[in-house]
Amino acid sequence: MAKKKIKDMSEKDWEAWGKAFGKKMEKKGEKFGDKMEAWGESFGEDFECKANNFECHWSSKLGFFSILGPLFGSIFGIIFLIVTIFVLNVINIFIGSTFVSALTTFFSSNIVWFFVVSILLGYGKYLTKNIKLLRPILSPLVGTGGCIFTLWILGNIFLAINVSAKIAIIDTVANLLLTNLINIFIVFVVFAYMMQLLWIVVREIYW
């Protein structure tokens, strides 16, 4: 636009030019948004496809032996735990910590439980991932089981801390937690199934 035209433009001319410019930018923005949305959908589908192909590739490579994955994972996890307990015991020879001693005693005396629970949770996740029919049945149980197992470990860590700390509230909280694990498990499982049922109902209504 020439300088003379700009100088001679009235307020109405500027307003009209602004509206026209705004419409052009709006159209360009919509086109850009549509292109980005299409690209995002294409990228997501492509990424999901590649991820599925990668998973299928390794599943087909392992074939039947892929079912041994959770077992091998549990074995390696227990080996790592045993090595960790050994290292902590060696360190504790020099520092003489009652907390470390109580903690390693808890882990070493429950090594079988760690192995069993690790296998159960591992195969639970394996089944929910590979068998869609079992997913709504097992998923809440597996998730709640993992949560309760974590709370059990946490409660025993509190007890190990209180061996030397001797704080009444820590002992109370730890014992309250450990003595109510079954009740917590039941409440969490019922809540998980209710939320899953609610999600199915909402999905059926709105989708």
Image (cartoon, helix red, strand yellow):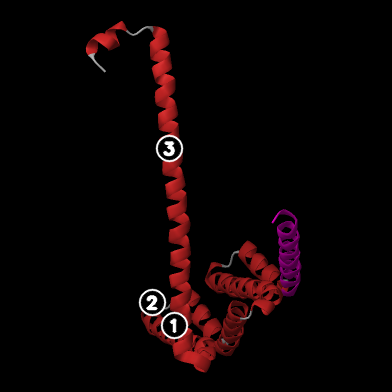
Q: Is residue 15 visible?
A: yes
**Whole-number angstrom distance, CA of label 3 to CA of label 2:** 66 Å
Q: How many numbered marks are there?
A: 3
SS category of the residue bearing label 3: helix
User: Is residue 65 highlighted in magenta?
Assistant: no
**Three-letter code, disc 2:** Ile
Residue located 66% across and 65% down the image: 173
Instruction: Provide the residue designation for mark 1.
Output: 57
Residue 181: quadrant of the picture: bottom right
Q: Mark 3 highlights which residue?
A: 29
- Which residue is outermost to the bottom? 64
Q: Position of residue 26 (x, y in %)?
A: 45, 32
Residue 95 disc label: 2
Circle 1/circle 2 CB separation < 8 Å: no
**For numbered disc 2, what is the local secondary structure?**
helix
- Report whether 112 appears left or right of 81: right
Report the quarter where the C terminus lies.
bottom right
